[in-house]
Amino acid sequence: MTPLRARLGRAIRRLRKAGGYSQESFADRCKLHRTYMGAVERGETNISLDNLERIAKALNLTAGQLLLEAEKER
């Protein structure tokens, strides 16, 4: 797990929970599988740019804004 991948996963989990989504409902919103989202949140998998954009849109962010949120995680 790379540091950025871990921070991005933590940011996605934080923002998902702040939005009131379960992991399953959020995965559905992103049109991704729940187990994939779990791996993303744990920093266990690389995220394609397409999936980064899907996740960001589901959080009402741009991909750039989501990456900036990841930089806030330490």
Image (tube, rainbow, N blue to C red):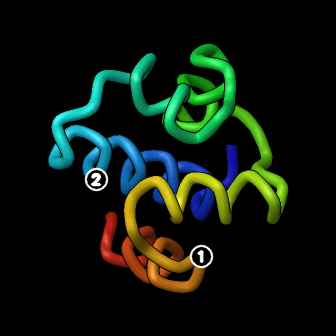
Q: Residue at x 76, y 50 (%)?
A: 47
Image mark count: 2
Q: Residues within 10 Å of mark 2 (few under 14, many from 20)?
A: some
Check disc 1 and report its element: helix, strand or loop.
helix
Task: State the CA–CA distance, disc 2 to disc 1.
Answer: 13 Å
Q: Is residue 41 left or right of residue 5?
A: left
Whether residues under marks 2 and 1 lie with C-beta atoms below 8 angstroms apart, the answer is no
Residue of label 2:
15
Q: Residue at x 53, y 76 (%)?
A: 67
Considering only order in the chain, which callout, 1 or 2, is on the residue closer to the N terminus?
Answer: 2
Q: Nearer the viewer, residue 58 or 11?
A: 58
| Quarter occupied by residue 64 | bottom right
- Tell which of 66 and 26 is nearer to you: 26
Q: Residue at x 31, y 43 (%)?
A: 16
Q: Position of residue 37 (x, y in %)?
A: 58, 29
- Residue at x-position 58% and y-position 17%: 34
Residue under label 1: 63
